[in-house]
Amino acid sequence: MTGTGNQTRHHETQIVADPDVPLVRITREFDAPRKLVFRAHTDPELVAQWMGPNSTQNRIDHWDCRTGGSWRHVSIQEGQEYGFYGSFHEVRPDELIVQTFTLEGMPDGVALEKLVLEDLGDGRTRLTATSLVDSFADRDAFVASGMEVGVNEGYEKLDELLARG
């Protein structure tokens, strides 16, 4: 959905650190059908276009988005490469992705991530993503690492991608 002046509407992203569990919860609405939002999270060519902050480029080395599959991508920022990898534990078309997320070089910092897509009707979708880590210290370091910038800028790029269909 586009607003006046042919500009894409951006929704607020809520990022909440759970006080009782070492978990971060991200909630965001998109003006696009659930099927398109799901595809943007599972098609490696699309993922590379929107994921992360504006200051990075992404290279998908491996992306087998199915239950039991795995993935690896590299974010490139100012000539530095940062590798990430994980496994897809459960993928349900158009509604759910459960995966692990690990920054290369930090094998003890595995996060368990769950992404749920809810059809809100009228071509709108609510995304709720949770990331559970091993400790509150790891969670707080994750949040302090600039995650908020990457999430917000990434979802703004995703808005633009979804608006193009």
Image: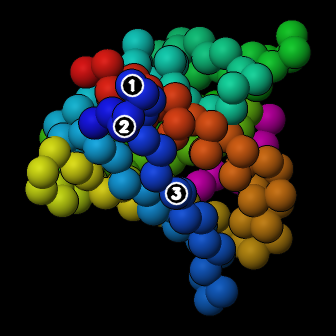
Read off the residue under disc 1: 6
- The chosen color scheme is rainbow
Helix, strand or loop at mark 3: loop
Local secondary structure at mark 2:
loop
Is residue 118 a member of the stretch shown in magenta?
no
Q: From the viewer's perspective, is residue 19 above or below residue 12?
A: below
* Amino acid at pointer 1: Asn
| Label 1 Cα crowd, 10 Å radius (few <14 / some 14-19 / many 20+) | few
Residue at 38% in and 34% down: 4
Q: Is residue 66 above or below residue 152?
A: above
Q: Magenta residues: mostly which secondary structure? A: loop
Is residue 132 visible from the viewing direction of this image? no
Q: Which residues lie in the magenta part?
A: 105-112
Q: Is residue 100 visible?
A: yes
Q: Position of residue 131 (x, y in %)?
A: 54, 60
Q: Nearer the viewer, residue 152 or 18?
A: 152
Q: Are marks 2 and 1 in contact (CB under 8 Å)?
A: yes
Q: Amino acid at mark 2?
A: Gly
CA–CA distance in space, label 3 to label 2: 15 Å
- Residue 3: numbered disc: 2
Q: Which residue is mark 3?
A: 12
Picture layout, residue 165 above or below residue 140: above
How would you rate the neighbour count of disc 3 (Cα within 10 Å): few for under 14, some for 14-19, many for 20 or more?
few
Image location (x, y in percent) of residue 79: 86, 10
